[in-house]
Image: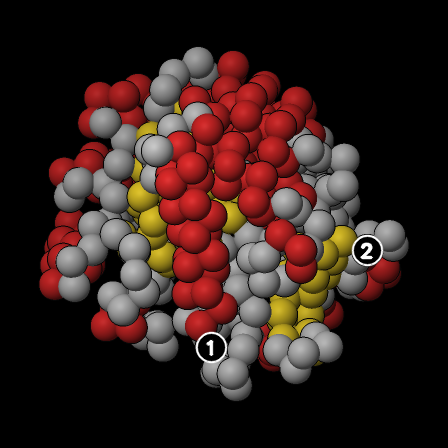
Amino acid sequence: MQMTFRWYGKDDPVTLEKIRQIPGVQGVVWALHHVPAGDEWEMDDILEVKADAQRYGFNIDVVESVNVHEDIKLGLPSRDKYIENYKKTLEKLAKAGVKVVCYNFMPVFDWTRTELFHKMEDGSTALFFEKAKITNLDPMAFVKEIEEGSKGLTMPGWEPERLSCLKTLFERYRTVTDEDLWSNLEYFLKAVIPTCERVGIKMAIHQDDPSFSIFGLPRIITCRDSLKRLLSMVDSPANALTLCTGSLGSNPENDVVSIIKEFGGRIAFAHIRNIKRFDNGDFIETSHRACDGSIDIVEVVKAYHDMGFAGYIRPDHGRHIWNEDCRPGYGLYDRALGVMYLLGIWDTLEKAKQ
């Protein structure tokens, strides 16, 4: 298992110097967030990130994400142009030493929460999802609320160029079914996986977050059966998973530990976080501790340890604690606590094994 930590680049308040002081972190998970979805990444930009990371002893093996252009998801004639750009970017990333590219195939929104800084009993704040609010809220009003609460920091999946054409996107997706989206995903994978096989990169899909439909948009990567279908669609080691406990765990019907055990050989990258689910469909991010949420993180880590997992892991969203002013879900302190909790479980399992 290789511990990593997400880093948003030079404008990230969580600097490489700070990340370096978290014991056990070997690499940073990164992206060129200034590049619009569909554009080819420049080699000079990639190598600049690599140089910055190596200066602090980190690898850049995992990219999250090379965003998939909406025209690819919609299956428009223009998709081939964007797929070619994607393949060229993969080739450049491989030359820089990247091993895994995390991506998703979620229409419009990469992830959805109704509140970015929900107050918890202990005084911390966390990302919160209120199901009734999503059901009754106009998407445009929802986006305005989220933008106002983001503290001016760009969030993944909420890039300005994407939000600027939101109304048009919703119109285009009005007639897109789940099967249409599956077909478009298959087209994309069959185009890019041969490049991945040739250059030695794994494409690791992230589950829809949350793992059920919102705003009437199609959502297809949501459960055990959908993961099985995805992996059999292009049966190649390069067609892999980013297994996110929080995304899958948002649906109480998903047995996250069983899913890890079943698909462990195809998991290239693991996002580990905990959420507390409520009976009305709401959920909130919690600390990583098993007893604080609805997902048994101890059993999650044990499942990875039992299979001898050698891939990449990162603590996912954290709470905002100790008055930290940070990007929603991506402060330093609680994610650092998450690293130490996950490594503590792993070290204990290693000691017991020995």
Q: Nearer the viewer, residue 15 or 131?
A: 15
Number of numbered labels in the structure image: 2
In 3D space, how far apart are the residues under numbered discs 2 and 1 (Cα atoms)? Answer: 26 Å
Which residue corresponds to the image point at 34% horizontal and 49% vertical from the top-left?
3
Q: Quadrant of the C terminus?
A: top left
Name the image quarter holding residue 119: bottom right
Give the mark nearest the N terminus, 2 or 1.
2
Q: Position of residue 174 (x, y in %)?
A: 72, 42
Which kind of residue does numbered mark 1 sit on? Cys
Vertical placement of 74 versus 4: above or below? above
SS category of the residue bearing label 2: loop
Q: What residue did someone put label 1 on?
A: 326
Q: Position of residue 314 (x, y in %)?
A: 41, 51
Q: Nearer the viewer, residue 22 or 139?
A: 22
Q: Judge the density around disc 1: few (<14), some (14-19), many (≥20) Cα neighbours within 10 Å.
A: some
SS category of the residue bearing label 1: loop
Viewer can see residue 42? no
What colouring method underlies this structural image? secondary structure
Which kind of residue does numbered mark 2 sit on? Phe
Q: Position of residue 179 (x, y in %)?
A: 67, 24
Q: What residue did someone put label 2 on?
A: 278
* Residue 41 shown left or right of residue 233 in the figure: left
Which residue corresponds to the image point at 52% horizontal and 83% vertical from the top-left?
322
Which residue corresponds to the image point at 54% horizontal and 25% vertical from the top-left?
261
Vertical placement of 119 versus 44: above or below? below
